[in-house]
Amino acid sequence: MWWVAWRQHRLQIAVLLAVMAVGAAALIILRARIIAVYHEFGCALFGSAGNNSGLGCVDTDGRQVWWNYGFATWSSLAHTAMLAGPVVLGVFAAAPIFTREFGHGTQVLALTQSVGRTRWFLAKVTPMVVPLVGGLLALGFLMEWTDQTVEETAYFGLAESNFFARGIVPAATGLMAFGLAIAIGMYARNVVTTLVVGMLASGAILLGVGNVQPDVLPAQRTVTPLADIYRPITQAELDAQRSDNGQSPSTDFDRNARWIGGGYLDAGGRKVTTSSAQKSGCFAKADKAGNAAAIAAGVKPEGESGGVGVSVDGSGVVAAQPESGYQNSVEYINANAQEMLACMRSYGVAASYNDMLPGSMLWPLRWAISGIMLALAVAFTTIGAGRLRWAVAKR
């Protein structure tokens, strides 16, 4: 039976493997080309010394290599192929397996031999599943290997465009599409219909799983009291912030993390919804309080040249007020924060929160999503196997 199944589907298996081999070669060539160009301009690769700034690589003319040498485009195309490819290949591998048997009537000969339906079903399916899953696993890890070449693509593993294109997830997606196409083929008994419906339905399922992906595992919530957000600062703290442009060291930032959502909480930890009008009103009050405090302290607005005025509708001359105003003075900042704190508290807000998926959740989430895909594949395949008796009776 295995030999017969191989003989029947060897051309299909060869095409499947050839397509995946071309994809693998393209990823290897892309990686090699990126490394060659980065070395040409003396740029460090991801994980090597000197590649922690995130400033990228520039050529001798000062152009950004990642964008101007086409790598951003090719990387985007590779990710798109790794998102859609498993669906297409999974449906392509499954669609003709049984529909062609029913179309030619050859299932009658197979099932009148001393072979049970279950054994026939498994013998037909297995020769296609093994190369499909093996090839997609190889492509998924090749995609991850290629993305780890430079800093531009090394991070954000939990974002959908990276998550579903790397590691074990493409193989799980292909397996889900394969099982669905098996079930559809048992009902449609037509290759073209199975291909079209299978790809559309598998794509819809992939989008649905992508939508629930952030909620499969519990996010980590960080709660910050409002008093800490709008706390007073000293002139020394303000000067320190200016000296480092307000940036924290890159080592403190989890660049594989994914922000899920955020908002405000009351004193009891319950979510508080504030309208745009309420927040805009608080910002306006806080800005007014900050300006008043800066003026009272004799702060000179940034950019003021001293004594220069503007005429307003011929009604007289008023002091020029540059756009930046007083916002960079400690007097403005503290008065602004105090008013903002009071205003937000008046609406019941006691703290803000942010829900994040840390980078450490990458592999647990991969296993969870792959488990969901595998469960769907088993369910669809079981439906197809259960439909086999009816499909044979309807020949």
Image (cartoon, grey):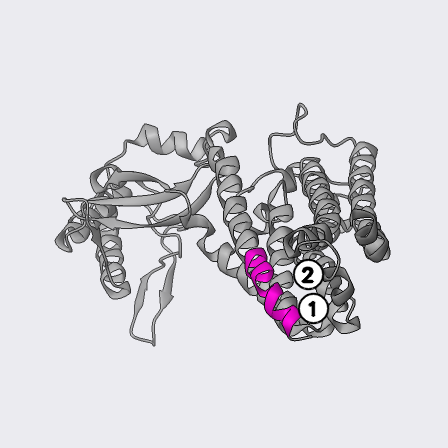
Q: Position of residue 252 (x, y in %)?
A: 46, 29
Give the amino acid type for the residue marked by disc 1 in the picture: Leu
Q: Is residue 83 magenta?
A: no
Is 381 within the magenta? yes
Percent of width and height locating residue 44:
72, 30
Q: Residue at x 44, y 37 (%)?
A: 358
How many marks the image carries: the answer is 2
Label 2, label 1: how many angstroms apart (C-alpha)? 6 Å
- The earlier-in-sequence mark between 2 and 1 is 2
Question: Compared with residue 211, is residue 144 higher up or lower down, i.e. above or below?
Answer: above
Choose between 324 and 61: the one closer to the eye: 61
Reply above or below: 74 against 227. Answer: below
Tell whether label 1 touches label 2 (CB within 8 Å): yes
Write down the residue under mark 1.
195
Say the numbered circle drawn on residue 120: none
Name the side, left or right, on which 57 lies relative to 269.
Answer: right
Where 119 sits versus 317, above or below?
A: above
**Mark 1 Cα-neighbour bin, 10 Å: few <14, some 14–19, many ≥20:** many
Quadrant assignment, res 25? top right
Circle on res. 91: 2
The overriding secondary structure of the stretch rendered in magenta is helix
The local secondary structure at tag 1 comes to helix
Residue 318 appears left or right of 173: left
Q: Amino acid at mark 2?
A: Val
Residue 152 placement (x, y as % from top left): 64, 41
Towards the viewer: 368 or 54: 368
Q: Which residues are magenta?
A: 380-393
Q: Label 2 crowding class (10 Å Cα cut-off): few <14, some 14-19, many 20+?
A: many
